[in-house]
Image: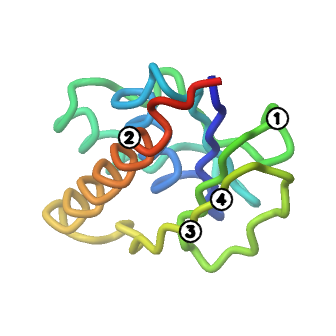
Amino acid sequence: MKRVAYICEHNSCRSQIAEALSRHFAGSVFESYSAGTYIKTEINQDAVRLVKQLYGFDMSEIQRPKLVNVLPKIDIIIALGCNVNCPQLSVAYRELWEIDDPVKKSDEEFIKIIKEIESKVIALRDKFKGNKQ
């Protein structure tokens, strides 16, 4: 199974959402992780609340902010466009997702961004679905 890491600067919002949705929608295709180049002490509480409202699970129960250097060997890196210089890990595949930062936006805007991440996660899953090894 391929390992995918969603990388964002603080690993507190977009990358955590992507990890959670990847576990939810692509758990049979990927081992999913998220990490940051710097971290905050907790996952953004609006992200936790809205993901729970939309999908029925609490991502903060199994996820926590972490640095890139604690990840296992990764096959796929998805950088979430946060003006961060993504570490140059040796991987087989890499994408940049330019996704707005939803922090301090209305719930409506936040949900649009969550749905955009969902769509990208599903497209990534479908791209690698037949290539699990």
User: Could you tell me how many numbered marks the image carries?
Assistant: 4
Q: Position of residue 60 (x, y in %)?
A: 46, 30
Write the residue at 20% across / 62% down: 112
Instruction: Check residue 94 in the rendering and tell me which mark sits there, or answer none.
Output: 4
Q: Mark 1 and 4 residues: CB-CB less than 8 Å, in contact?
A: no
Q: Position of residue 109 (x, y in %)?
A: 20, 68
Q: Foreground mark, 2 or 1? A: 2
Image side of residue 132 versus residue 105, left or right: right
Q: Foreground mark, 2 or 3? A: 2
Q: Position of residue 2 (x, y in %)?
A: 64, 30
Q: Amino acid at mark 3?
A: Leu
Q: Earlier in the sequence, mark 4 or mark 2?
A: 4
Q: Position of residue 118 (x, y in %)?
A: 30, 48
Task: Name the residue that disc number 3 marks.
Answer: 96
Query: Label 2, label 3: how many angstroms apart (C-alpha)?
Result: 17 Å
Query: Label 4, label 2: how many angstroms apart (C-alpha)?
Result: 15 Å
Question: Quadrant of the rendered structure where residue 39 is?
Answer: bottom right
Query: Label 1, label 4: how many angstroms apart (C-alpha)?
Result: 14 Å
Task: Name the residue that disc number 2 marks.
Answer: 126
Write the residue at 61% across / 43% down: 34
Position of the C terminus by quadrant: top right
Q: Amino acid at mark 2?
A: Asp
Task: Name the residue that disc number 1 marks.
Answer: 73
Image side of residue 131 versus residue 119, left or right: right
Q: Mark 4 and 3 residues: CB-CB less than 8 Å, in contact?
A: yes
